[in-house]
Amino acid sequence: MSTDIAEQPAGFARLLETESAGAIAAVAAEVARRAPRSILFVGRGTSDHAALYAAYLAEIRLGLPVASASPSAITLYGARPDLTGTLVVGVSQSGGSPDLAGVMSVARETGALTLAVTNNPSSPLAQAAELSIDVVAGHERAVAATKSYTAELLALLMLVEGIRAGDGHLPAEERAALDELPRLAEKTLTDPSATELAQRYRFASSLVTTGRGYAYPTARETALKLMETSYLPALSFSGADLLHGPLAMADPDVPVLAVVGEGPGGQSMRDVVTRLSDRRADVVTIGAADVPGASARLAVPAVDERYSPLLDILPLQQLALSLALARGEDPDSPRGLKKVTTTL
């Protein structure tokens, strides 16, 4: 897991290379040409969190209605919804889960434009879709996904911005900003704060993660990483939902990881941190600036809010790894889990 985490700056650079960027641009141009009126994402686990990030991007940047598919409606109950005019995007590291490939096949038969985003271009999911994007993350050693997740994020970002451009190609200013990501990721990963923070949560019995907007998928992915590597019960809420009831459980014994970045989402999270502080919760923020009410911060570079999820998750992956080791667990081989989860 440590090696996989360390390879992410190189993974960003690989996706931004001419060949990979050109392949994504070609897919984006074709989607723009077909002009879908809505987008439906389908994924499981970590890839579902990447899809959630893309959903925010698509709604905000493309102005299209976006939904998350319910695979069981198709694979278990036999539903065949009319998906004419819909772009259906399947996101999966392995592309090997039968239910995702099944959704893609039915979507294609019922009028959708289908796209697979995977780390395995020869997978059943990629073969079932009309279009496909290879996130070129390379072989992932650990069961817990890290580098394939951030590769999915960047590929989906490049896809959405390419669709928005119309011809698939990123504007020069956008491309220049993305070219900084490998360096910024390298800088983020050299900070030892996340490893040091692990000792603080060694004996925690539960934990809460929270964020809003583009940061919400990061909060969800963090909770999943903590649960699958440290077996630590972790609840994830959007900052808005946290204030609608779950805030009542906040106290000094329930640590909170709050993703507070730049932009509207980060600004709204500052009020959430204040409310948590009023309840004497132990709040650690992830962001570029200190937040009143927080007891500590995992520092990340200040970037456009759209890019933050690609960097915010890095110290949180390091935290999950270090916490698992501190608790005497093996983060490379979580009990009961394997790399490809088969659901029907």
Image: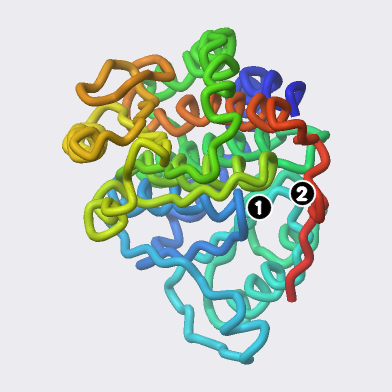
Q: Quadrant of the C terminus?
A: bottom right
Give the residue drawn at x 51%, y 53%: 51
Q: Residues within 10 Å of mark 1 (few under 14, many from 20)?
A: many
What residue is disc 2 on?
A: 121
Q: Nearer the viewer, residue 113 or 102?
A: 102
Q: Is residue 126 left or right of residue 279?
A: right
Q: Is residue 25 visible?
A: no
**Is the residue 243 above or below the residue 145 in the image?**
below
Element at badge 2? loop
Whether residue 231 appears in this view of the structure is yes
Query: Closer to the N terminus: mark 1 or mark 2?
Result: 2
Task: Specify the label residue 132 is tagged with.
Answer: 1
- Which amino acid does the dot numbered 2 rest on? Pro
For this rendering, which residue is in front, 163 or 39?
A: 39
Left or right, 339 with reference to 149: right
Q: Position of residue 214 (x, y in %)?
A: 36, 41
> CB of mark 1 within 8 Å of CB of mark 2?
yes
Front residue (pair 25, 125): 125
Q: Please provide percent x and percent y for residue 260.
A: 31, 30
Instruction: Name which residue lies at 57% across and 90% down.
Output: 79
